[in-house]
Image: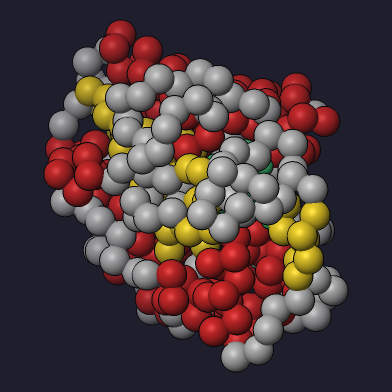
Amino acid sequence: MSILVTGGAGYIGSHTVLELLNAGYDAVVIDNLCNSKTESLKRVEEITGKSVKFIKADIRDRAALDDVFANNKIDAVIHFAGLKSVPESAEKPLEYYENNIGGTVNLCLAMRDAGCKKIVFSSSATVYGGDNVSPLREDMPTGKTTNPYGTTKLYIEKILQDTAAADKDWSVCLLRYFNPIGAHESGRIGEDPRGIPNNLMPYIMRVVVGKLPELVVYGNDFDTPDGTGVRDYIHVVDLALGHIKAVEKVLGETGSSIYNLGTGIGYSVLDIIAAVEKAIGRPLPYKFGPRRAGDIDTCFSDPSKAKRELGWEAKRNLEKMCEDTVRWQLNNPDGYGD
Ligand code: NAD
Ligand code: UD1
């Protein structure tokens, strides 16, 4: 079976391609490399001893997509390609709507015309908004997103659900990720963000390698046990393995489904700092600062539906997430390099 992975050179994509190869699938990757480098896929090939077919292409380029489907027998698509920075999306909403939503519609049109109607999509816990009380369940209301990035995820979910409702041959699996961190335990692939990171763990890693002086903890007056924000951090390899189960599902049946991919456990920013300090064996410099706009107190999943229906659950604990992130960062202080 051959799986087309859009955005497969990126952080979650590269870890998923690795697990697809390990599970015996062939992987064809398309990526425009706007936020990644092909080095990630070279290393996936090294680790697995298997090859990946890489095509540099943009999901908004219909002719390029038609070529991909004409020249490769694709059984299903895992769709990661998209822009993902929350602050950038607030500055450039049209670019986000065009890339994420326009790109997805273009991809689905090409899939439909090629007769490949099975898709797994990277959604986000951000679609739950701030009003629902954790643990978040898939049947809770969505819709109150606070930024254009989150809104693209919400709209794409709806577009894919409408597509599956209109044509019974489609099979759609929406995966709502919580907070992916960690890296493959080889220390060869991991997250390599450009510029100053927005998210907690990549920021901490810049402090660990001395590229940033200290972490600013965004607020210590949240309604949580220690006052700092609580999130559901999930090891990227567990997340990748969730995609293998989702691919099995879309290959085996039609219709649409939604699953949370999280651990079900909430950790605070101070818990993460303590776990990183244990992994590096020294204190991490940090100070408290004001809250970041849009941040909520607590967000963690109820992951029981994925366990029940997909037979998937996260197995790697916070200690392992931090050990693996630190190994990747210390082995590759400049990420994949220039
Ligand atoms: P990433 O930026 O590392 O990977 C996305 C990849 O898509 C990149 O390699 C980028 O070059 C590519 N891409 C972007 N636009 C493209 C286009 N028009 N055509 C072709 N390729 C394009 O991000 P990631 O963290 O691996 O995230 C993967 C997916 O998961 C994204 O859709 C993201 O929104 C979603 N997601 C991520 C998180 C997270 O915390 N990392 C959480 C929830 C959801
Ligand atoms: C953020 C996005 C969310 C997106 C998710 C995954 C916002 C408001 N939300 O969520 O839409 O789906 O990333 O990409 O941007 N923190 C610090 N200092 C830092 C960075 C973060 O204290 O330098 C804190 C935050 O306040 C939060 C926690 O760490 O409590 C996690 O932050 P982050 O990694 O950005 O993820 P989310 O806030 O969950």
Q: Is residue 149 visible?
A: yes
Question: Residue 85, percent across and down?
Answer: 70, 42
Q: In this orientation, which residue lies closer to the viewer: 234 or 185?
A: 234
Q: Quarter of the image holding residue 140?
A: top left
Give the colour scheme of this rendering: secondary structure
- Looking at this view, name the residue that lies furthest to the top: 166
Give left or right: position of 196 versus 127. Answer: right
Question: Residue 28, percent across and down?
Answer: 43, 52
Q: Quarter of the image holding residue 21?
A: bottom left
Question: Residue 126, percent across and down?
Answer: 53, 34
Q: Is residue 336 depicted above or below 108 in this figure?
A: below
Quadrant containing the C terminus in the rendered view = bottom right
Residue depicted at x 69% and y 38%: 86
Q: How many numbered marks are there?
A: 0
Q: In this orientation, which residue lies closer to the viewer: 178 or 107?
A: 178
Give left or right: position of 89 versus 157. Answer: right
Residue depicted at x 75% and y 22%: 94
Q: Is residue 9 visible?
A: no
Q: Quarter of the image holding residue 278?
A: bottom right
Question: Residue 48, percent across and down?
Answer: 38, 76
Residue depicted at x 29% and y 12%: 165
